[in-house]
Amino acid sequence: MYKINENYQKLPGSYLFSTIAKKVSAFAEANPQKEIIRLGIGDVTQPLAPAIIQAMHQAVDEMADAATFHGYAPDLGYEFLRTAIAEHDYKARGCDISADEIFVSDGAKSDSANIQEIFGQDNRIAVCDPVYPVYVDSNVMAGRTGTYNAETETWSNVIYMPCTMENGFVPEFPKEAPDIIYLCLPNNPTGTTITKQQLQEWVDYANKIGAVIIYDGAYEAYISEENVAHSIFECQGARTCAIELKSYSKNAGFTGVRLGYTVVPKDLKCQGASLNQMWARRHGTKFNGAPYIVQRAGEATYSPEGKAQLKEQVAYYMKNAAAIKNGLGAAGYTVFGGVNAPYIWLKTPGNMTSWEFFDYLLEQANVVGTPGSGFGPSGEGYFRLTAFGSYENTLAALERIRKL
Ligand SMILES: Cc1ncc(COP(=O)(O)O)c(C=O)c1O
């Protein structure tokens, strides 16, 4: 008789956003006259930029002609896109990354969940707390996280690095040495980040203890401060200890288009094996390439027009972020983030739990946010609002919250 992967049985509750969706639809059904503003899920709302649409149209036309038709894409990505990434995202920033160290994919969610496959079962992972839940959940599915304690909402074999108001949301080196360190910077959900110097210390630490850093740079385009690195490969020594994940979802609005990439440097070696070759083998076996049309869309993000249009789009969302941050701050809330990321992280008022504040905001202001506790135990007592709504909705939500 067949057996299931019992690790799936260990996963607690349902996924955060499905719980939110259920609560919101129950409220909407009971209150059909109320207009709900959604600042919960981190999905974009602005349409694709004209330069991207133009590239996609052109690629669609190529698919209509046998002479220019494209079938299976190379499973590691088209050369034109990998070269553009190496040039614009790395060489232009002084990072030594070549096209054959870049693996094009359908987004950072799958890469961040799949990357653990190339590591042994008995590795100990460390995560920032709170953080994007996929890192822990994918390791739970792989059976690497030990037992779950429902009271503390922690796994016995996961090292949590609390990021709270008290330490300025900056992760500290853990007491026990981890093998795999997940860093998501700028961080989802806190919207905070660390300086390039602090990141350099993480690189030095990883090299010293023989750990690998999985660096999720999904929000890199939102960095506005000078002393923050746009890639971990800006740090000395990162080529021997880091893997970087990138996404076109937040910088170019590709949440529904689907495109991302992972950088695995050739200098990253363990037990005599090249992780670059291992990931190439894994990718080649389990992934059949991102669509040609989508990769041409990705290429268009690097054209002069594409770059200018995306800069404007990011500025649009960051104007929302500033409005929320300043507005809530003026209304007496304690607010963080919103400077290098499109997320505002606020302390729930009056010692409310994250879910209590979620219900309060939904019922009293008809605004949907995300409870901080959904991102890890140290997220309890915090709440996330996203800047990805329209400017009008953002201001309207703000006004409603201010009136509470
Ligand atoms: C930190 C982080 N990484 C990855 C993703 C997923 O990115 P993609 O849309 O490329 O799968 C998200 C999406 O919200 C995210 O917040």
Image (spheres, rainbow, N blue to C red):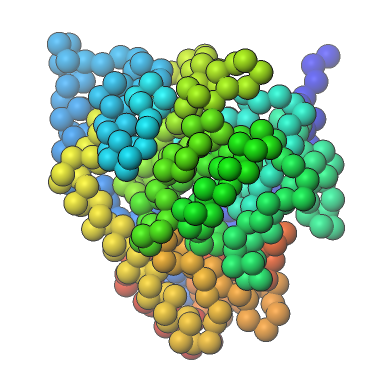
Picture quarter containing residue 270?
top right
At horizontal 77% and vertical 29% (from top left) the residue drawn is 122
Percent x, y for residue 398? 43, 78
Percent x, y for residue 236? 47, 40
Quarter of the image that includes the N terminus: top right
Relative to 59, 159 lies left or right = right
At horizontal 80% and vertical 41% (from top left) the residue drawn is 157
Whether residue 108 can be seen here? no
Percent x, y for residue 11? 74, 42
Relative to 198, 65 lies left or right = left
When the figure is inspected, residue 64 is found, relative to residue 248, above or below; the finding is above
* The one of 313 and 224 positioned closer to us in this rendering: 224
At horizontal 48% and vertical 28% (from top left) the residue drawn is 264
Whether residue 234 can be seen here? yes
Relative to 81, 17 lies left or right = right
At horizontal 40% and vertical 27% (from top left) the residue drawn is 102
